[in-house]
Amino acid sequence: MKRFLIPLVIFLVLVGFLGIGLKLDPHEVPSPLIGKPVPDFRLVLLSDPAKHLSTADMRGKVWLLNVWASWCSSCRQEHEVLLELSRQGIVPIYGMDYKDQPADAQAVLDRFGNPYVETVVDLDGRAGINLGVYGVPETYLIDKNGVIRYKQTGPVSRESLEKKILPLVKELQK
């Protein structure tokens, strides 16, 4: 009887962990950077490779950093949502083109519209790695002091925008 009891207990513990895991939202991957300063970067602009944008340039404003790529199909899912947000002018959106060819990224923006104030090019992916990017798309909400306040893993949806991102933006802009 005892030899059946131990495997049964192990099985029940594994089922418990599986049940907990199934209830978690895969878009809410915890980030160790929440509440910490955004890692410094100074990257060339997609629109003008002779110019740069750095995290220091963003001090004093609440902003979104959307990490995306032309080869990313999920990025296309969120593109219309980002365009709508950009048109509303509630919060500036900056793009980080991640491990992508600049010409391909520019072609996507030319074809589907550009929701970004500026897009920086992270050709080798180092800035993204410093941010803890798991994959694209990922979106970070950064406060006036340069601290990451929220991370959206996966496409930004209208629901995540309305329920999580915009209320936090409004709170941070006070």
Image (spheres, rainbow, N blue to C red):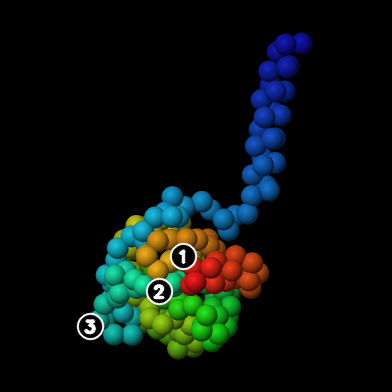
x 49%, y 71%: residue: 174
Q: Secondary structure at mark 3?
A: loop
- Residue neighbourhood size for the residue with mark 2, other residues' Cα within 10 Å, grouped as few (<14), some (14–19), many (≥20): some
Identify the residue under disc 3. 50
Label disc, if present, on residue 61 of the rendered structure: 2
Residue at the farthest top position: 1
For marks 3 and 1, give the one nearer the viewer: 1
For marks 2 and 3, give the one nearer the viewer: 2
Mark 2 and mark 1 lie on one chain; the one further toward the N terminus is 2
Is residue 21 rendered to the left or right of residue 51? right
89 is higher (above) or lower (below) than 27: below
- In front here: 87 or 168? 168
- Residue neighbourhood size for the residue with mark 1, other residues' Cα within 10 Å, grouped as few (<14), some (14–19), many (≥20): many
- Going by the numbered disc 2, the residue's amino acid type is Lys
- In front here: 89 or 29? 89
Identify the residue under disc 1. 140
Q: Secondary structure at mark 1?
A: strand
- Look at the numbered discs 2 and 3 and tell me whether their residues touch, using CB distance below 8 Å: no
- Measured from the top left, where is residue 11 in percent x and y? 69, 28
Quadrant assignment for the N terminus: top right
Label disc, if present, on residue 34 of the rendered structure: none
x 66%, y 25%: residue: 10
3D distance between C-alphas at marks 2 and 1: 14 Å
Quadrant in the picture for residue 25:
bottom right
3D distance between C-alphas at marks 2 and 3: 24 Å
Quadrant in the picture for residue 119:
bottom left
- Measured from the top left, where is residue 141 in percent x and y? 47, 66
3D distance between C-alphas at marks 3 and 1: 26 Å
Mark 3 and mark 1 lie on one chain; the one further toward the N terminus is 3
- Going by the numbered disc 3, the residue's amino acid type is Ala
